[in-house]
Image: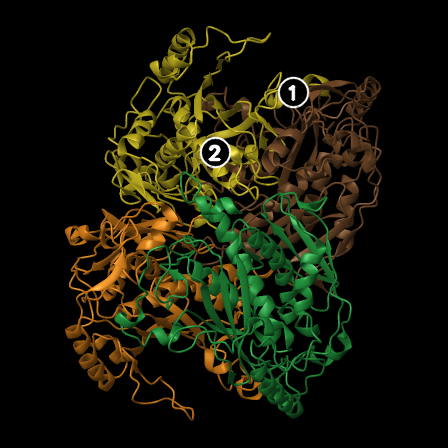
Chain colours: A yellow, B brown, C orange, D green
Amino acid sequence: MAGNRLGEIFSVVSFGESHGPAMGCVIDGCPAGLSLSPEDIRRELRRRRPGQGGASTGRNEPDEPEILSGVFEGKTLGTPIAIVVRNADQHSADYENLRDLYRPGHADLSWEAKYGVRDHRGGGRSSGRETLCRVAAGAVAKVFLAAGGIQIRAWTSSIAGIDIPGPFLPGGGQDPAFDFDETENNPFRIPRRDYAERVAEKIGALKKEGDSAGGAVSCRAEGLPAGLGEPVFGKLDARLAAAMLSLGACKGIEFGAGFAASGMKGSENNDVPLPGGAYKTNNAGGVLGGISTGMPLEFRAAFKPVPSISGEQETIDRRGEVRKIIIQGRHDVCIVPRAVPVVEAMSALVLADLLLLQRCAGIQEPVHTKRT
Amino acid sequence: MAGNRLGEIFSVVSFGESHGPAMGCVIDGCPAGLSLSPEDIRRELRRRRPGQGGASTGRNEPDEPEILSGVFEGKTLGTPIAIVVRNADQHSADYENLRDLYRPGHADLSWEAKYGVRDHRGGGRSSGRETLCRVAAGAVAKVFLAAGGIQIRAWTSSIAGIDIPGPFLPGGGQDPAFDFDETENNPFRIPRRDYAERVAEKIGALKKEGDSAGGAVSCRAEGLPAGLGEPVFGKLDARLAAAMLSLGACKGIEFGAGFAASGMKGSENNDVPLPGGAYKTNNAGGVLGGISTGMPLEFRAAFKPVPSISGEQETIDRRGEVRKIIIQGRHDVCIVPRAVPVVEAMSALVLADLLLLQRCAGIQEPVHTKRT
Amino acid sequence: MAGNRLGEIFSVVSFGESHGPAMGCVIDGCPAGLSLSPEDIRRELRRRRPGQGGASTGRNEPDEPEILSGVFEGKTLGTPIAIVVRNADQHSADYENLRDLYRPGHADLSWEAKYGVRDHRGGGRSSGRETLCRVAAGAVAKVFLAAGGIQIRAWTSSIAGIDIPGPFLPGGGQDPAFDFDETENNPFRIPRRDYAERVAEKIGALKKEGDSAGGAVSCRAEGLPAGLGEPVFGKLDARLAAAMLSLGACKGIEFGAGFAASGMKGSENNDVPLPGGAYKTNNAGGVLGGISTGMPLEFRAAFKPVPSISGEQETIDRRGEVRKIIIQGRHDVCIVPRAVPVVEAMSALVLADLLLLQRCAGIQEPVHTKRT
Amino acid sequence: MAGNRLGEIFSVVSFGESHGPAMGCVIDGCPAGLSLSPEDIRRELRRRRPGQGGASTGRNEPDEPEILSGVFEGKTLGTPIAIVVRNADQHSADYENLRDLYRPGHADLSWEAKYGVRDHRGGGRSSGRETLCRVAAGAVAKVFLAAGGIQIRAWTSSIAGIDIPGPFLPGGGQDPAFDFDETENNPFRIPRRDYAERVAEKIGALKKEGDSAGGAVSCRAEGLPAGLGEPVFGKLDARLAAAMLSLGACKGIEFGAGFAASGMKGSENNDVPLPGGAYKTNNAGGVLGGISTGMPLEFRAAFKPVPSISGEQETIDRRGEVRKIIIQGRHDVCIVPRAVPVVEAMSALVLADLLLLQRCAGIQEPVHTKRT
């Protein structure tokens, strides 16, 4: 199948080019009978919207979702849910000089190698604007998950070279300085106000330089029953890794102790199971053998710096000749804060799908899906 | 779909429990007319086999593959290729005490939460022995790729806390100390003899302690045409990430500069395109926008330490009561060297599939697939 | 996966309820570089539109398609092509009395058994209006097929109990009375004017009675290369059978000699191959072993009479009590003429997909796909 | 995906060539905890085996199934169930003269057009022997369905031009002459002894002539809950149609009143719903809008005559020259009786899958799946 579809049961097809008429998605497989309103989608789209702080692009779009199908009298019908968002604030003329030039760090060249043709305006479908489709679909998945008591929260854990300490103290226990409620209060989605201030300075300096930054997003899902994930190729972590790496700027992912675990001894890394379903530690990040353990799911995704920078760069043109390029248009200095709701959305899509698939695992329905 | 199938066109279904009658796979979608012999599969299975060095388990199996279908007079027919390997050297009695106990760091508990039942002998299907099926299938994919001029090579780049320097010098250029041909000469699959010796000591010490180690595998594919990968959810890196995280012990993956890229500026990270199809640098790891650029594909996967260690550990039993556990049986101190051919196999499966999918991208066949 | 997706490579997701805001589809996997205009889609939608003759409903909608994505400067991009058609002329109030009643012969009851909820207005998603999505998608597939020299033509071969003789004389040879060009000249899509007149009378009489009729559609595809179809479960005829039976009113299908072949002897039924790729006869209908033979593909699909009739009928209501029902709204006396473009569209979708899949059958591309 | 996989959740991959080492299948997605023994599979394979009567081939194989995985201590594990049956009684030399000749009515030519290569021995993978894989997989599906109270029964309803009257009298009510228990007592699987005797004579005569016959199989599934089927492309009847047409000799299918319904008026064809979930009639064959109604599922599939006949036939060879052909080997006069268990198996596979998919239709599990 072509690559614009994600999920087996709770599945989504994404469509739209950055400067085409509209972006959108079709969700097929959302269970019937779920209460769903446009506001559920609007709320998440608003979190993804640009123009929320020093780090993001000046493009300003209302991003108003229209639900074209699948919902009747406030409830899902079990039929496909099509959601469309019109593109409103394109400045396509900004891109006219890119028709024959390939921007460094962008997918212009590889995209053209693949398809022979390319919509050069704003990156076409390789634009970050495509994540809007994911957030819209993910918003529906979140409503479904919330009905089952599952909550997903992501935050900026590294940005512009500044690492934000996590929720746990090195010796164990919660760090009181980590305040998840702070996350949506600052433009960087950092759960610590002190760090948000330091980052603001750094990002401001980069903006002046005309340069850009990357970072990392951490994500945590709570309320997951044990048993989600389809061994051996559809493992929970495999599915999430694919979902995150399907984001254009994502260059890596790690679960639980992740890369650090690769340097540990077995005796250090093993999480000891406790009576009642919990574990003494969670180095595994809530997934063992590709199946959720019932502990919080924890992973971290790395994002490269925004490739669109203001300074002059070298590149080649369509004829293969060396050229200078100046990138116009409005660009984020760092997309990591805006990636936070996208990471949540992608996680929600994967989890909703695995939750439904788990209904098929036994000859009797597992008890935990009853709550949904 | 249940989780034992990988790939859209060149697809594989894996089957078998560690202590059941046999392991195997069925490849559906391998193109017709490819020359294929049992030796092509045997050669790769031999690389995965245990008992090759200080790091691996004492289990000794011939792992002789039988091709049950899909090949006639030395050529593939275009029909499913079924490959079976009998399990021969099981010591199931070693596992009898694990019927009601859950091993820390293993998938025993999560697996049982999922399915309600579990084959406790050797981990059943969550055993590392399941990777045999992947290596068998990957061997066929490698033959297909080789016919198209694509070569995949992996190596141990970190083990037991010791990082092995990569092929490139920090300032650019090849490091002459990195000798890929050395990789298969030492039991750790390290491309430097000096590091292999240091690692031998460290692993020996861990073995004495009854402890275990993790590490990382680096992988590089050369000869890939630009254009592989199916945006937006079937991106080359997304597909590879899922393939690697589908390995039980894998806890993370990064492409090109990976996590390090997240701390760079855009001006540092952007790879500048050169006339002729190459780039000045390869921070992207050969993939931009989820599509191969034509530069070498490069990624690194992290593996946690082997959870089976000799010492007494704490755990719970089926009734939820705290118990002591001593793990018997034969176990690797570190599976990283044996993961090397598995990482190659998984990469080959993904690339073979994407190479075939790429034949469908345009109204005219792209020229580069003609070589296959 | 949920059931609103068809196809592996050239795939389509259909969405929309009859009285919701819009109907539409997303095509994923249409090759890049194909010339495509809204008129290509409009032309086919016009053929499906009601109000074209004595047999069809009075509902009158412009059915103007909007292409939201996937086409840039008149060429397909290789990205998803989303097409939306607004619902304009709903008379939802006509259906208010059906909120708690189940119409005989309709899917009201079974749909509610499945999902628990139902959009009662005009049948919701089980409405014949959903075929609009298929025709829109099929129009794109037709453009792709036409570029490869493949033409699909369907016609009404039976209606209201009147069988229309086929293109061939019983003894062999073409029947000159069969004039395919006549098909689009009469409201019944019958390739013989004499029969069209007889049918007009019969349909007129049924309309007065307040009753309805069924019939059959025959379909023929020419220009197909030999080799299409994916044995064993994705056979050409298996895929087409699923496509036709996915139409709500379709109750049967037969290929070539079909049910009549089941009464023949082997010596009568076998088609003898001739030098040059043709066969003496085409009892097989152009498909052997599920693979196209290169002869014209021929099949016939049966459609039941329209279940919405004017007279009073018996049924039950939501509480399970017996009730009388009078169906209001505007309904076709017979949908068979309007099914003709739908059958063509579904055939085109299947063939486009199999044509792309066939690119993956060999280690070298087969020659015949070069023409596309 | 290549064509050897059927099903979304309860899925099967089939493999094997008629004269290769073995036939087999891998079932992925069978729920865990189901009691399953080799005898469950052996029983169904025995029904498919040749040599049971005047109509079938002299090839005699034990067809002993070996379960390689997925079952532990008599219960399914939720992991893939691989089943292998060795090919034992091949007479490959019988086929040597067919290496360069294409048998009329067989898939030899179309298969070679597709793949470029072909296993000419016994039809390779296009052999009827491939249905063994389906029967083995279907046997597992039947066990799963039986646990949910669903029973599937097929029978020969037409053979060699002789139609066997169905279970219902034209005026309504059961025909006492129709005795389903008789079906397995005669070699033709006809539920009436009188007809079985007439057929024996006819088939005997055809055998002497060296000719062959076709026929039809009727199938009925009882105990199905209302609600199965995935609109709009995964409808119950669409899925079954694809399953039946995936059988090499099948040339048509009809549901309920089928082709006859196309000549009825709406007032005649509509099934009136009754209190309690039943309908006055079952012209729909138990499926409305592609969803099971709760009435018995009823369909009929047409099979062409066996193409292998004894007499001399005309054909072409690999160089495209006209040749005479005499087909040796052992062949059925009519495969319809042996198709009966195959039709049941294919139905079981489709129903098992749809039953699992239905678990995902609502936010709460539907009550009827609790019985499984």
Q: Chain for mark 1?
A: A
| Crowd tier of the residue under label 2, counting other residues whose Cα lies within 10 Å: few below 14, some 14–19, many 20 or above | many
Residue A229 lies in quadrant: top right
| Crowd tier of the residue under label 1, counting other residues whose Cα lies within 10 Å: few below 14, some 14–19, many 20 or above | many
Q: Position of residue D83 (x, y in %)?
A: 69, 55
Please determine whether, in this image, residue D34 is positioned above or below residue B161: below
- Residue B227 appears left or right of C22: right
What residue would you read off at disc 2?
A351
Element assignment for label 2: helix
Residue D24 lies in quadrant: bottom right
| Between D25 and C11, the one nearer to me in the picture | D25
Of the numbered discs 2 and 1, the one sitting upstream in the chain is 1
Count the numbered circles shown.
Answer: 2
Q: Which amino acid type is shown beneath numbered disc 2?
A: Leu
Residue at mark 2 to residue at mark 1: CA–CA distance: 23 Å
Q: Position of residue D316 (x, y in %)?
A: 61, 84
